[in-house]
Image (cartoon, grey):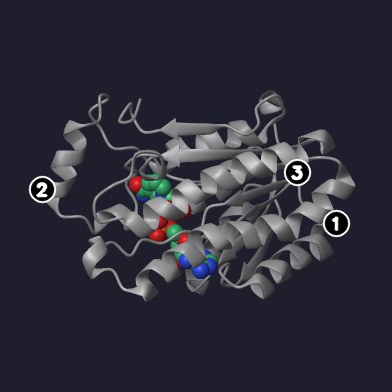
Amino acid sequence: MLQDKIAVVTGASSGIGKDIAMKLALKGANIVVHYRSNDEEALALASNIEKIGSKALVVKGDISKMADAEKLIEEAISKFGRVDILVNNAGITKDTLLLKMSEEQFDDVINTNLKGTFNCTKSVTKHMLKQKSGRIINISSVIGVVGNAGQSNYAASKAGIIGFTKSVAKELASRGITANAVAPGFIRTKMTDVLKDEVKEEILKKIPLNKFGEAEDVANLVAFLASDEASYITGQVINIDGGMVM
Ligand code: NAD
């Protein structure tokens, strides 16, 4: 389905990003495994990708820095000659109530989640414009749609990603490039493991399908959006949350 396509996945050494990278590789894509700090996990993922017959390139960097985002895309182009799919997945939380939130906590989350998405998208766009094709898939969150107490920084960053995605979709559509946002609900990863059991129980009560999502659920949706079958979908926000927000 994605035979010989080149996909860049940011924050791929753990959680949702890792499953997205593996899923795209299983569909035939070659993967640029981008990560920030966990060398061991990134190299293990690259080796698993190669075991199933796809190529992998490992690139370390901090997406909140434009220079690192540019380097990521340049390394992808110099190894593979093109980038067909960009998945802006890397993200962080620094949760606390507004009155306790420091300027640094606000800036860190915006700079990683929103500015990081801008940095990587801007860096890849000139190549996709030349190719007259491309898929940009941004991992937002249902929190960016409905907000959440204690997550004003995160909600702002994820809502920002939605506005950014729609604008980019409008700018790039005439050149055969689609841009969509995926808004997961509660997915079982390192990011959500830290929540207290009482909080998890309260969240579960709000999920009609009565279970938490898995990273693979998000990876399946991303693989679809990256495929030819999704070529007429752009500028959309697709919730994947067991019905939590509807
Ligand atoms: P995770 O913590 O396992 O993965 C996040 C990855 O991003 C990590 O590998 C981390 O190293 C990387 N990263 C963070 N800052 C970075 C930076 N500045 N530069 C490069 N890489 C950086 O968490 P996850 O749950 O897999 O989250 C993946 C994405 O999904 C995030 O954008 C998150 O906001 C989003 N999301 C997650 C959930 C959930 O329930 N887990 C729900 C909605 C949205």
Q: Where residue 11 sits: x, y (%)?
A: 52, 60
Q: Where residue 4 sits: x, y (%)?
A: 77, 43
Q: Where residue 202 sits: x, y (%)?
A: 14, 40
The quarter of the picture where residue 193 lies is: bottom left
Query: Relative to the observer, which residue lies in front, 9 or 45?
Result: 9
Looking at the figure, which quarter contains the C terminus? top left
Looking at the figure, which quarter contains the N terminus? top right
Please identify the residue farthest to the left as the structure is shown. Answer: 198
Disc 2 is placed on an element classified as helix
Q: Which residue is mark 1?
A: 81
Query: Relative to the observer, which residue lies in front, 117 or 6?
Result: 117
Q: For this view, does 132 lie left or right of residue 200? A: right
Q: For this view, does 80 lie left or right of residue 221? A: right
At x 60%, y 73%, the residue is 65
Q: Which residue is mark 2?
A: 198
Q: Amino acid at mark 2?
A: Glu
Q: Where residue 93 sits: x, y (%)?
A: 36, 61
Q: For this view, does 118 lie left or right of residue 213? A: right
Q: From the viewer's perspective, is the residue at label 3 or at label 2 nearer?
A: 2
Q: Alpha-carbon distance for marks 1 and 3?
A: 11 Å
Q: Amino acid at mark 3?
A: Lys
